[in-house]
Image (tube, coloured by chain):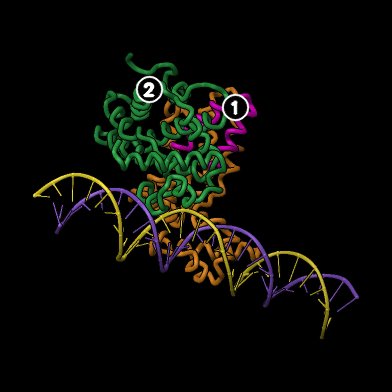
Chain colours: A green, B orange, C purple, D yellow
Amino acid sequence: MAPVEATAQRIRAAALDLFLRRGFDAVTVEEVAAAAGVSHMTFFRYFPTKESVVLTDPYDPMIAAAVAAQDPGLAPLERVRRGFLAVTTQMDDTEDAEARARVRLVAGHPRLRAGVWESNQATADAIEAALVADGTSPFDARVATGACLGAVTAALLDWGMVTDDGTLLDRVRRALDHLALVPGDDGPA
Amino acid sequence: MAPVEATAQRIRAAALDLFLRRGFDAVTVEEVAAAAGVSHMTFFRYFPTKESVVLTDPYDPMIAAAVAAQDPGLAPLERVRRGFLAVTTQMDDTEDAEARARVRLVAGHPRLRAGVWESNQATADAIEAALVADGTSPFDARVATGACLGAVTAALLDWGMVTDDGTLLDRVRRALDHLALVPGDDGPA
DNA sequence: AGCACTGTGTTAGTTACTAACATCTCGTGG
DNA sequence: CCACGAGATGTTAGTAACTAACACAGTGCT
């Protein structure tokens, strides 16, 4: 692992640990930095904001690509829906406890919840661009994207708030099924 | 007008004016307070955060009530959709330039955009409660709400980013139409 | 060895936001 | 007419997130 990755990982681990034990607001950036053995300036070099330590997911480009790969003849909403589904299906099943802990942290904090949407923006923009490139109007693209992202994000946050043991992937699939014109039809196998 | 309302209104007007002219980040709370003829403490007594001056809409309770009033026999997504539609239809047509200016301000600023979702949370919670009260599972309620709110919010933000002259209400209707099982069917007239 | 580059620390800000307490205004009862 | 109490506002002093400027150390290349 490159040294820069290692440092980022150390900071992230220290931050999550402290946030989970004492709450997001009760922990200062200074403390996180100290726990990771760096100064607060180093913290901000790796993460632009305190929130961003928690709000980081690497799925944005994958989803946009998957949407672009769907049949352009489908309705925009259906294309986006199947794009999400495609990515979800090929996720590795290591739905580790850490992911859930992170989601739980986010779900329980209004400002972090809002931050999810801020970080979703990049994903949304990419998906919209993919749709528009195939002739969908910007408006329709944004609405279809907003609906799917809204449904999936709601499902994720719900996953972080309840105590049952359903898997993340199952929840996303169930969420997207609500948006299908023909429920249960996920396109060609 | 009660004096407290008058002060809040003065602060809001001063803030919007400054934000629109110089950008949200380039204006300090202190400046807004000065422009409104109060101290920064008074500002924070009326608005909990700098963002909240911009992000205030009074439609939350109306929407939840409208959702609750829809036929419980319908699918959750359809109930939420028609609830939104009902409120939208009875909005007064004074889609003043100020509303659009505000939306434009929000649409152009990542943190404000995120703040929209934070303020949407109250609406979402109320809608979900209305659905759950009629027997919908919490998960389905959250997903349906997230999808509709996602679509409508996307439509609003889009309205704030383009330059054409469509009305706000028309946009919301078009957005919700994307989520209809039978496009164009908005339920009983 | 000398040099650049990269990662990091130090310091000193700015700004959003909070708490504690002082003051002011205004309507009411004496 | 004056005292009083309550609500609205101001002052002051603080905390914490974030930024800019610059100094310093280790590592690789020549």
Residue that label 1 marks? B71
Could you say where residue D24 lies in the image, as x and y percent from the top left? 30, 59
Could you say where residue B62 lies in the image, as x and y percent from the top left? 59, 42
Q: Which part of the image, by quadrant, shows the C terminus of chain A?
A: top left
Q: Secondary structure at mark 2?
A: loop
- At horizontal 39% and vertical 60% (from top left) the residue drawn is B23
Q: What segment carries the magenta color?
A: B121-150
Residue that label 2 marks? A92
Could you say where residue A14 lies in the image, as x and y percent from the top left? 46, 41
Identify residue type, mark 2.
Asp
Residue A146's place in the image compared with A72, above or below, is below
- Residue density around tag 2, few if under 14, some if 14–19, many if 20 or more, within 10 Å: few
Q: Do we see residue A27 in this rendering? A: yes
User: B71 and B54: which one is in front?
Assistant: B54
Q: Secondary structure at mark 1?
A: loop
Residue A179's place in the image compared with B56, above or below, is above
User: D29 and A150: which one is in front?
Assistant: D29
Which of the chains bears the disc numbered 1?
B
Identify residue type, mark 1.
Asp
**Separation of residues labelled 1 and 2 (CA atoms):** 41 Å
Q: Are both tags, 1 and 2, on one chain?
A: no
Say if the magenta span includes residue A39: no
